[in-house]
Amino acid sequence: MRRSLALIAVAAAVAAAAAVVVSGMSSGDGASTSQAAGPTGALPSGHPSIGMPGAATIADDSPSASASTSPVEVGSTRGEDSGDVQALLDQGDAYFMQERLELAEQAYSQALARQPGNPAAQVGLAMVWHARGASKRAEKALKAVLAAHPDDQDAHYSLAIVLFSAGRTDLAKQEWQKAADIDPTSVTGRRSQSFVDLIDGHESAAPEAGAGN
């Protein structure tokens, strides 16, 4: 639940993008689907845009940029203890939502250095990479998290965003459904189910749309 607010903040425009994509699917317009679900067109509101000013994109095989930048100043949200992993995670979330991606990457990386294998830090890094254009790298990282933590709801939700942004709607739907099934009562679970229902609704309407033509 710790990352729910940061993740759910991107949901409204994901839903809007999903509506465009599944509408294209219903009409059989493959070009519309591809355009709507491209790596730059389907990023939700509140999610840092790929190629945004001041946040250079990175390649999928590029090393982390955090090693060459200054340390994150921790303490504005959770006190002065720089060793507090939770503070670093919170700081990373805050920087991510402010679209200060290099600083977000630093915070998540420091949290991971202090607590190797921390799934929240790994998910945070993956979403930073996705926002900076390294979606394959993000997908690989999220799948690694899920291999170790198959019931990590945020990892399933985040992987769905990465897959949806690449136009892989069916796989995104599967990940949203998994996230919903883990805890249907949580905010992330309810939001995930709403995406599944949206996609299902348009898929079920597709034959009727075709019959009218």
Image (tube, rainbow, N blue to C red):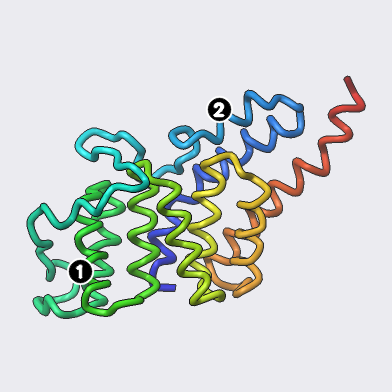
Which residue does the numbered mark 1 point to in the structure image?
110
Q: Nearer the viewer, residue 184 or 135?
A: 135
Q: Residue flagged by tag 1: what amino acid is it?
A: Gln
Q: Residue flagged by tag 2: what amino acid is it?
A: Gln
Q: Looking at the picture, does residue 135 appear above or below residue 95? A: above
Which image quarter: residue 58? top left
Whole-angstrom CA distance, mark 2 to mark 1, is: 36 Å
Which residue does the numbered mark 2 point to in the structure image?
35
| Marking on residue 39 | none
Q: Residue drawn at (29%, 54%), measured in percent from left and top?
A: 96
Which image quarter: residue 186? bottom right
Binning the other alpha carbons within 10 Å of mark 2 as few (below 14), some (14 to 19) or many (20 upward) gives some
Residue 37 lies, in percent from the top left, at 55, 36
Residue sticking out furthest to the right: 211
Which image quarter: residue 82? bottom left
Which of marks 1 and 2 precedes in the sequence? 2
Residue 156 lies, in percent from the top left, at 54, 63
Asked if residue 5 lies left or right of residue 17, the reply is left
